[in-house]
Amino acid sequence: MKGFSQKFIDFPDYILGITKEIWEDRGIATLNEYYGEDMYLRMPLGVYRGNQGVISKTMSTLVEFPDRELLGEDVIWSGNEDDGMLSSHRLYCTGTHLGHSMFGEPTGNTVHFRAIADCYAINNAITDEWLVRDYGGVAKQIGWTAQEAAAQLIEAEGGIDHCEKPLTPHNDMVGPYTGKGNDNEWGQRYADVLNRIMSADLAVIPEAYDRAIKGEYPGMTTARGWGEVDQFWIGLRAAFPNATFKIEHQIGRDDPMMPPRAAIRWSLHGKHDGWGSFGRPTGAEVYILGMAHADFGALVTDQPKIRNEFALYDEVAIWKQILMQTG
């Protein structure tokens, strides 16, 4: 690849390789090479600029989970060598909670959780990133609810007036990547499905999803079949019934030896004014950064449907926004 180290076979190999080198091989100093000095990182719990801040957060996470392993499940990407490439990298992470962290005292519990990172890379360096980790799943496995974890985080950071502010359109920053992905049909198919779901057209679920659909959702929740997938999506939408849903980025790919698949980065912004996955309506204004991957397949000839779905948002960040406004 032009501009990239020749030790990498292709762009997915670059993404998988540097992730292992940084996290598992303890090559934290290589972030000075692989992350641009003025890079941008957006997470639901905050916005950061500069690779030194990213290095600091990386070391903190390794204190929390010193044996952390990151298994790259997929890299769905778009772009080219001249303009740069955007990867949507889905990871299955494991580790033991052995250090002091945002989740309080070490518990010794083994945790498993997913993360999806959208990374823009050019000339062997990442300069823009959007990252969603399933912190709700982590909280659950160490004995907390996502709401309790959010309350603990606010207190640990000095209270409502002083705590770190979650990502919203008001504190977001425009980085070097302003692309929208590609126009591949599988990305468009999945975007259409999510738009219909968020328009309360839940009839799309039996139309677009395989009857044996397997969904992996926040809180390390696994759903099987149309009913459980419906329950997940309607639970989110019902909690924010008037919020604005937006497709921020979409990629579709049809690669040899892989199923057709899609990666969508989306947002939901509005009032918590409905009964749903976040309990009693509070009226709090909430911004949700979401990521979703889907695999397609056709068990019946010429009838491709979604067979696997991976959708993530950060429940802790949502509760933090609610609690900051409601006490």
Image: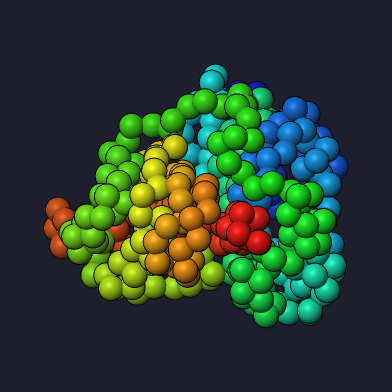
Give the answer, above or below, for where 255 lies relative to 222: above
Give the answer, above or below, for where 173 lies relative to 319: above
Q: Is residue 237 visible?
A: yes
Query: Could you tell me which residue is drawn at 34 percent across and 70 percent down?
Result: 231
Where does the image place residue 225, in percent across and percent down from the top left? 29, 73
Q: Quadrant of residue 251?
A: top left
Query: Could you tell me which residue is drawn at 75 percent across and 27 percent down?
Result: 38
Query: Could you tell me which residue is drawn at 48 percent across and 27 percent down?
Result: 179
Q: Quadrant of the C terminus?
A: bottom right
So how many labels did they put on this image? Answer: 0
Query: Could you tell me which residue is drawn at 16 percent across and 56 percent down?
Result: 303
Q: Is residue 5 visible?
A: no
Where does the image place residue 322, in percent across and percent down from the top left? 58, 58
Where does the image place residue 77, in percent across and percent down from the top left? 48, 39
Where does the image place residue 176, in percent across and percent down from the top left? 61, 24
Give the answer, above or below, for where 75 lies relative to 208: above
